[in-house]
Protein backbone atom coordinates (compact mmCIF):
# COMPACT_ATOMS: atom_id res chain seq x y z
CA UNK A 1 0.00 0.00 0.00
CA UNK A 2 2.84 2.38 0.86
CA UNK A 3 4.34 1.61 -2.54
CA UNK A 4 1.15 2.77 -4.27
CA UNK A 5 1.03 5.91 -2.12
CA UNK A 6 4.65 6.66 -2.94
CA UNK A 7 3.91 6.16 -6.65
CA UNK A 8 1.02 8.64 -6.69
CA UNK A 9 2.90 11.08 -4.45
CA UNK A 10 5.74 11.05 -6.99
CA UNK A 11 3.58 11.76 -10.03
CA UNK A 12 0.85 13.95 -8.50
CA UNK A 13 2.85 17.15 -9.18
CA UNK A 14 2.91 16.28 -12.89
CA UNK A 15 -0.90 16.01 -12.91
CA UNK A 16 -1.19 19.33 -11.07
CA UNK A 17 1.17 20.94 -13.58
CA UNK A 18 -0.96 19.63 -16.46
CA UNK A 19 -4.11 21.09 -14.91
CA UNK A 20 -2.44 24.45 -14.30
CA UNK A 21 -1.18 24.50 -17.87
CA UNK A 22 -4.70 23.91 -19.19
CA UNK A 23 -6.11 26.70 -17.00
CA UNK A 24 -3.28 29.08 -17.93
CA UNK A 25 -3.88 28.69 -21.67
CA UNK A 26 -7.66 28.97 -21.59
CA UNK A 27 -7.94 30.79 -24.92
CA UNK A 28 -6.05 28.01 -26.69
CA UNK A 29 -8.24 25.37 -25.06
CA UNK A 30 -11.52 27.08 -25.99
CA UNK A 31 -10.42 27.83 -29.56
CA UNK A 32 -9.41 24.20 -30.06
CA UNK A 33 -12.69 23.01 -28.53
CA UNK A 34 -14.78 25.34 -30.71
CA UNK A 35 -12.91 24.15 -33.81
CA UNK A 36 -13.59 20.52 -32.93
CA UNK A 37 -17.29 21.21 -32.25
CA UNK A 38 -17.63 23.03 -35.59
CA UNK A 39 -16.05 20.09 -37.41
CA UNK A 40 -18.53 17.73 -35.71
CA UNK A 41 -21.47 19.89 -36.82
CA UNK A 42 -20.07 20.10 -40.36
CA UNK A 43 -20.00 16.30 -40.52
CA UNK A 44 -23.55 16.24 -39.12
CA UNK A 45 -24.89 18.49 -41.89
CA UNK A 46 -22.94 16.58 -44.56
CA UNK A 47 -24.59 13.33 -43.50
CA UNK A 48 -27.95 15.07 -43.15
CA UNK A 49 -27.64 16.13 -46.82
CA UNK A 50 -26.82 12.51 -47.72
CA UNK A 51 -29.96 11.25 -45.98
CA UNK A 52 -32.15 13.98 -47.47
CA UNK A 53 -30.97 13.08 -50.96
CA UNK A 54 -31.63 9.38 -50.38
CA UNK A 55 -34.92 7.70 -51.27
CA UNK A 56 -34.76 5.56 -48.14
CA UNK A 57 -34.91 6.53 -44.47
CA UNK A 58 -31.85 4.38 -43.83
CA UNK A 59 -28.38 4.43 -45.35
CA UNK A 60 -26.17 1.34 -45.01
CA UNK A 61 -28.33 0.28 -42.06
CA UNK A 62 -28.08 3.67 -40.28
CA UNK A 63 -30.95 6.07 -39.66
CA UNK A 64 -30.24 9.79 -39.35
CA UNK A 65 -30.70 9.47 -35.60
CA UNK A 66 -28.11 6.69 -35.47
CA UNK A 67 -25.69 8.73 -37.56
CA UNK A 68 -26.11 11.87 -35.41
CA UNK A 69 -25.46 9.93 -32.20
CA UNK A 70 -22.51 8.17 -33.85
CA UNK A 71 -20.95 11.45 -35.00
CA UNK A 72 -21.18 13.24 -31.66
CA UNK A 73 -20.07 10.23 -29.61
CA UNK A 74 -17.18 9.80 -32.04
CA UNK A 75 -16.29 13.47 -31.54
CA UNK A 76 -16.44 13.10 -27.74
CA UNK A 77 -14.39 9.90 -27.77
CA UNK A 78 -11.80 11.33 -30.14
CA UNK A 79 -11.46 14.49 -28.08
CA UNK A 80 -11.05 12.70 -24.75
CA UNK A 81 -8.65 10.05 -26.09
CA UNK A 82 -6.53 12.55 -28.00
CA UNK A 83 -2.89 12.56 -26.96
CA UNK A 84 -0.23 15.05 -27.95
CA UNK A 85 2.53 12.78 -26.65
CA UNK A 86 4.12 12.63 -30.11
CA UNK A 87 4.40 16.41 -30.26
CA UNK A 88 5.67 16.73 -26.67
CA UNK A 89 8.31 14.01 -27.04
CA UNK A 90 9.33 15.29 -30.47
CA UNK A 91 9.78 18.85 -29.20
CA UNK A 92 11.94 17.70 -26.28
CA UNK A 93 14.08 15.59 -28.61
CA UNK A 94 14.60 18.54 -30.97
CA UNK A 95 15.41 20.92 -28.10
CA UNK A 96 17.58 18.36 -26.32
CA UNK A 97 15.67 18.80 -23.06
CA UNK A 98 14.64 15.14 -23.15
CA UNK A 99 18.05 14.34 -21.61
CA UNK A 100 17.03 16.13 -18.40
CA UNK A 101 13.78 14.19 -18.24
CA UNK A 102 15.61 10.88 -18.68
CA UNK A 103 17.98 11.47 -15.76
CA UNK A 104 15.17 12.30 -13.33
CA UNK A 105 14.52 9.67 -10.65
CA UNK A 106 11.10 8.83 -12.09
CA UNK A 107 9.65 6.93 -15.05
CA UNK A 108 10.03 8.73 -18.39
CA UNK A 109 6.63 7.81 -19.82
CA UNK A 110 4.81 8.11 -16.49
CA UNK A 111 5.85 11.75 -16.13
CA UNK A 112 4.36 12.42 -19.57
CA UNK A 113 1.25 10.37 -18.79
CA UNK A 114 0.36 12.08 -15.52
CA UNK A 115 1.06 15.51 -16.99
CA UNK A 116 -1.33 14.79 -19.84
CA UNK A 117 -3.92 13.31 -17.46
CA UNK A 118 -4.11 16.74 -15.82
CA UNK A 119 -5.08 18.20 -19.21
CA UNK A 120 -7.59 15.42 -19.87
CA UNK A 121 -9.26 15.84 -16.47
CA UNK A 122 -10.00 19.50 -17.16
CA UNK A 123 -11.28 18.68 -20.66
CA UNK A 124 -13.49 15.85 -19.41
CA UNK A 125 -14.92 17.99 -16.58
CA UNK A 126 -15.95 20.70 -19.04
CA UNK A 127 -17.39 18.74 -21.98
CA UNK A 128 -18.16 15.15 -20.97
CA UNK A 129 -21.40 15.67 -19.02
CA UNK A 130 -22.85 18.36 -21.39
CA UNK A 131 -22.08 16.25 -24.47
CA UNK A 132 -23.52 13.01 -23.07
CA UNK A 133 -26.58 14.88 -21.78
CA UNK A 134 -27.04 16.56 -25.17
CA UNK A 135 -26.90 13.25 -27.02
CA UNK A 136 -29.45 11.67 -24.66
CA UNK A 137 -31.78 14.68 -24.95
CA UNK A 138 -31.55 14.44 -28.75
CA UNK A 139 -32.36 10.71 -28.66
CA UNK A 140 -35.32 11.36 -26.37
CA UNK A 141 -36.61 14.18 -28.60
CA UNK A 142 -36.44 11.94 -31.69
CA UNK A 143 -37.69 8.64 -30.25
CA UNK A 144 -39.81 9.84 -27.31
CA UNK A 145 -38.18 7.37 -24.91
CA UNK A 146 -35.14 7.31 -22.65
CA UNK A 147 -32.52 5.00 -24.13
CA UNK A 148 -29.74 5.56 -21.62
CA UNK A 149 -28.41 2.26 -20.25
CA UNK A 150 -26.06 2.32 -17.29
CA UNK A 151 -24.39 -0.97 -18.31
CA UNK A 152 -23.52 0.31 -21.79
CA UNK A 153 -22.35 3.60 -20.29
CA UNK A 154 -19.95 1.84 -17.90
CA UNK A 155 -18.58 -0.29 -20.74
CA UNK A 156 -18.08 2.90 -22.74
CA UNK A 157 -16.09 4.44 -19.85
CA UNK A 158 -13.86 1.34 -19.67
CA UNK A 159 -13.28 1.33 -23.43
CA UNK A 160 -12.60 5.09 -23.29
CA UNK A 161 -9.85 4.59 -20.71
CA UNK A 162 -8.29 1.73 -22.69
CA UNK A 163 -8.47 3.76 -25.91
CA UNK A 164 -6.71 6.67 -24.24
CA UNK A 165 -3.89 4.44 -22.98
CA UNK A 166 -3.43 2.96 -26.46
CA UNK A 167 -3.43 6.44 -27.98
CA UNK A 168 -0.95 7.77 -25.42
CA UNK A 169 1.62 5.00 -25.77
CA UNK A 170 1.26 4.91 -29.55
CA UNK A 171 1.96 8.65 -29.72
CA UNK A 172 4.91 8.48 -27.32
CA UNK A 173 6.46 5.72 -29.44
CA UNK A 174 5.73 7.75 -32.56
CA UNK A 175 7.37 10.80 -30.97
CA UNK A 176 10.70 8.99 -30.87
CA UNK A 177 10.76 9.19 -34.67
CA UNK A 178 11.94 12.79 -34.14
CA UNK A 179 15.39 11.25 -33.61
CA UNK A 180 15.32 10.47 -37.35
CA UNK A 181 12.93 13.02 -38.93
CA UNK A 182 13.92 16.07 -36.80
CA UNK A 183 10.43 17.51 -37.48
CA UNK A 184 7.18 15.56 -37.01
CA UNK A 185 4.68 18.16 -38.23
CA UNK A 186 4.09 16.70 -41.71
CA UNK A 187 4.21 13.05 -40.72
CA UNK A 188 1.89 13.76 -37.77
CA UNK A 189 -0.78 15.03 -40.19
CA UNK A 190 -0.49 11.79 -42.17
CA UNK A 191 -0.59 9.73 -38.97
CA UNK A 192 -3.68 11.50 -37.61
CA UNK A 193 -5.51 11.17 -40.93
CA UNK A 194 -4.80 7.43 -41.10
CA UNK A 195 -5.80 6.91 -37.47
CA UNK A 196 -9.05 8.86 -37.97
CA UNK A 197 -9.96 6.84 -41.06
CA UNK A 198 -9.01 3.41 -39.68
CA UNK A 199 -10.77 4.07 -36.36
CA UNK A 200 -14.06 4.98 -38.05
CA UNK A 201 -13.98 8.66 -37.06
CA UNK A 202 -14.40 9.84 -40.66
CA UNK A 203 -16.45 6.99 -42.17
CA UNK A 204 -18.17 4.37 -39.96
CA UNK A 205 -16.37 1.05 -40.14
CA UNK A 206 -19.72 -0.61 -40.92
CA UNK A 207 -19.67 1.16 -44.30
CA UNK A 208 -16.36 -0.45 -45.31
CA UNK A 209 -15.99 -3.86 -46.98
CA UNK A 210 -15.29 -6.76 -44.64
Image (tube, grey):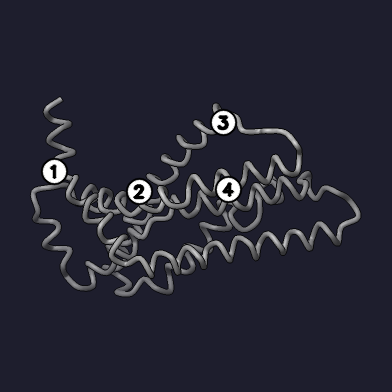
Residue at which label 4 appears: 73
Q: Are marks 2 and 3 in contact (CB under 8 Å)?
A: no
Q: Residues within 10 Å of mark 1 (few under 14, many from 20)?
A: some
Instruction: Please name which of the two marks, 2 or 3, marks the residue nearer to the observer.
Output: 2
Q: Residue at x 80, y 50 (%)?
A: 59
Q: Residue at x 37, y 56 (%)?
A: 171
If you read the primary sequence from the N terminus, does the residue marked by circle 2 or circle 1 appear first? 1
From the viewer's perspective, is 8 left or right of 85? left
Q: Are marks 2 and 4 in contact (CB under 8 Å)?
A: no
In 3D space, how far apart are the residues under numbered discs 1 and 3 (Cα atoms)? 35 Å
In 3D space, how far apart are the residues under numbered discs 2 and 1 (Cα atoms)? 18 Å
- Which corner quadrant of the image does residue 182 belong to? bottom left
In 3D space, how far apart are the residues under numbered discs 1 and 4 (Cα atoms)? 34 Å
Figure quadrant of the C terminus: top right
From the viewer's perspective, is 163 left or right of 175? right
Residue 176, relative to residue 105: is it above or below? Answer: below
Numbered circle sitting on residue 10: 1
Instruction: Please name which of the two marks, 2 or 1, marks the residue nearer to the observer.
Output: 2
In 3D space, how far apart are the residues under numbered discs 2 and 3 (Cα atoms)? 22 Å
Residue at which label 2 appears: 121
Numbered circle sitting on residue 152: 3
Is disc 4 placed on a helix, strand or loop? helix
If you read the primary sequence from the N terminus, does the residue marked by circle 2 or circle 4 appear first? 4
Is disc 1 placed on a helix, strand or loop? helix
**Relative to the observer, which residue lies in front, 71 or 191?**
71
Estimate the x, y position of residue 199 in percent, counting from the top left.
55, 51
**Relative to the observer, which residue lies in front, 148 or 73?**
148
Amino acid sequence: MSRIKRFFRTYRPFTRAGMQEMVAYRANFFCFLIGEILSAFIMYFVWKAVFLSSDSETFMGFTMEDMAVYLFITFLTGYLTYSDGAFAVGEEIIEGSIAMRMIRPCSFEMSFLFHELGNRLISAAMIFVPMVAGVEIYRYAVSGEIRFQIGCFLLYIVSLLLAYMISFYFNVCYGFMAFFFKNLWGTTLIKETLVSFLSGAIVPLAFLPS
